Image: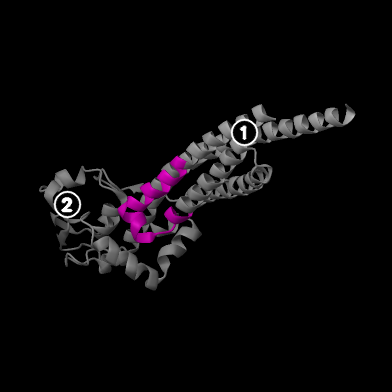
Amino acid sequence: MALSNNVIGAINFIAFLLSVPVIGAGVWLATEPDDSCVRILQWPVIILGILILLVALAGLVGGFCRIQWLLVFYLVAMLVLIVLLSCLVVFVYMVTVRGHGHPVPSRAYLEYHLDNFSGWLKRRVRSSYKWDSIRTCLSSTGMCPELNQSYRMAQDFFNARISPLQSGCCKPPTECGYTFINPTYWISPIDIAADMDCLQWSNDQSQLCYNCESCKAGLLASLKKEWRRADIVLLIALIGLIWVYLIGCCAFRNARTEDLFRRYKQGYT
């Protein structure tokens, strides 16, 4: 029984370590400018990681200190958390399946359309109330001004691989036919009816294309890229937790069997 409990404790220490990348993924998302403006995924990930850490700690204590009810709590609670983490991994994958950028002539960067993204993601930015706060947050970052420092010539900018956010929010859509002055200042559109965003563009450095559909699409494209990376981390942690949980269940069952056998022998003798 003691050996089995020690095994359970050691296994739960691995589960304890597996909570670290989950929490780390949430913290990383919280530090990204776009995620910090939207605040959708990072807190569920961080909270789930902390819960996994606490439950693993309970299993660790229960294993080494031979506290039976704590081990039972660990088995039930960890199963619930594994199911929740599995749902989160699948959910993130499903909402980020759609939403690819499309190339434009004579440009190295991609442009994005809001209709290409999943309905759930689009609803996060469709509301004017939600977008007003997101837009204010995005405009306070230095992502657009830094383009002016990096690219002086039009061809250099056209050959740049700028981020989805910069592509959607810091310049007008290419199909409008604006003339480049600098990355955030454009004049003389050829066809302002080509896209509604053509009318939304403003050379006011506090406005730019933050009211454009392309800016919302660029934000979702950026979120998709970061969420996919975080989802890979969560998937690896999930596989590790499932493996640890199954071994822990086997060790707990063996410990129970040893305990029953010991009691039977004591009663028999």
Is the residue 94 above or below the residue 9 in the image?
A: below
Q: Position of residue 88 (x, y in %)?
A: 54, 50
Position of the N terminus, as image quadrant, is: top right
- Name the residue tied to disc 1: 8
Q: Residue at left 71%, top 32%?
A: 255
Residue stretch in magenta: 20-44
User: Looking at this view, is 216 or 229 the one in front?
Assistant: 229
Give the quadrant of residue 169.
bottom left
Q: Secondary structure at mark 1?
A: helix
| Residue nearer the viewer, 131 or 80 | 80
Front disc: 2 or 1 = 1
**Residue under pointer 2:** 146
Q: Amino acid at mark 1?
A: Ile
Secondary structure of the magenta portion, mostly? helix
**Badge 2 amino acid:** Glu
Residue 218 in sight: no
Mark toward the start of the polypeptide (2 vs 1): 1
Query: In the visual, does 266 lie left or right of 228?
Result: right
Q: Residue at x 68, y 46 (%)?
A: 69
Circle 2 SS class: helix
- 10 Å neighbourhood of mark 2: few (<14), some, or many (≥20)? few
